[in-house]
Image (cartoon, rainbow, N blue to C red):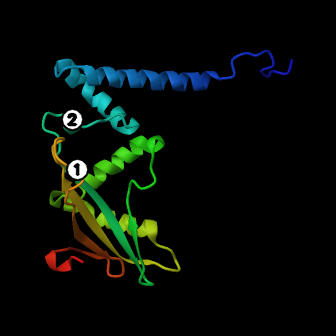
Amino acid sequence: MDGGNSGGGDPIGNGQKSLATIFILMFLFVAVADALPTSRTSALISPVADPIRVTTGFHQGWALFSPNPLSVEAHTFAISYTADGNSERWWPTEGMNRVNSPRHERWRKWETRVRLDDNDQYWEASARFVAAKNTSTLNPVVRVRLVRTWSDVPPPSEDNDSREYFVYHFYEWDTANETGRVLGESDQP
């Protein structure tokens, strides 16, 4: 006897079945927890379900489904300026598709929130991240600018082609001096 799978038996091992079963049970647990109305039971389940929901990408904010959804389409991107004088735009969600859906959704949430003045504590770390992601030893990034764009979302009855988009450079990080500054009207291109 060779101990192999020559008889057409189950090609999936018990360990893989156990992992699949655990994942399915976690998914069902989170789905049931989401479906519960606000109650004492949902309050008890939430501390256990929330970390699973966030880790697996199943978390969805109610702002998307609320009676008063967001009325602004907002995006954030960065511009990296290199030592040779060139610049490159970095969009966090560029090149992502449905396969990257949970990852895309997390970056989308980041870009709609990091642009807000109330979240200025994240600007330096964001600029440092972009600088590290786009630098090379031959041509290092010397400066990063964070840029926000937004447009009011018109009601469905209005023409969507005539929307006005606004662009504002709101933060700049100097990699050589390791200093950042909030940008004002005089800093706009």
Helix, strand or loop at mark 2: helix
Q: Residue furthest right?
A: 1
In the picture, the disc for residue 62 is: 2
Residue 97 image point, x, y percent = 45, 46
Q: Quadrant of residue 100?
A: top left
Q: Quadrant of residue 58?
A: top left
Q: Is residue 56 above or below residue 132?
A: above
Q: Amino acid at mark 1?
A: Asn
Q: Quadrant of residue 117?
A: bottom left
Q: Is residue 175 above or below residue 92?
A: below
Helix, strand or loop at mark 1: loop
Q: Is residue 125 above or below residue 188?
A: above
Toward the viewer: 102 or 74?
Answer: 74
Left/right placement of residue 164 relative to residue 126 reads left
Residue 120 image point, x, y percent = 20, 62
Q: Residue furthest left?
A: 68
User: Dot 2: few (<14), some (14–19), or many (≥20) neighbours within 10 Å?
Assistant: few
Left/right placement of residue 97 relative to residue 9 reads left
Looking at the rendered image, the quarter that the C terminus falls into is bottom left
Q: Residue furthest bottom?
A: 84
In the picture, the disc for residue 160 is: 1
Residue at 37% from the left image edge and 38% from the top image edge: 57
Toward the viewer: 180 or 158?
Answer: 158
User: Dot 1: few (<14), some (14–19), or many (≥20) neighbours within 10 Å?
Assistant: few
Residue at 27% from the left image edge and 66% from the top image edge: 147
Residue at 17% from the left image edge and 19% from the top image edge: 40
Toward the viewer: 159 or 98?
Answer: 159
Looking at the rendered image, the quarter that the N terminus falls into is top right
Q: What is the C-alpha distance between the residues marked 1 and 2?
A: 25 Å
Residue 113 image point, x, y percent = 23, 53
Left/right placement of residue 50 relative to residue 87 reads left
Q: N-terminal of the two: label 1 or label 2?
A: 2
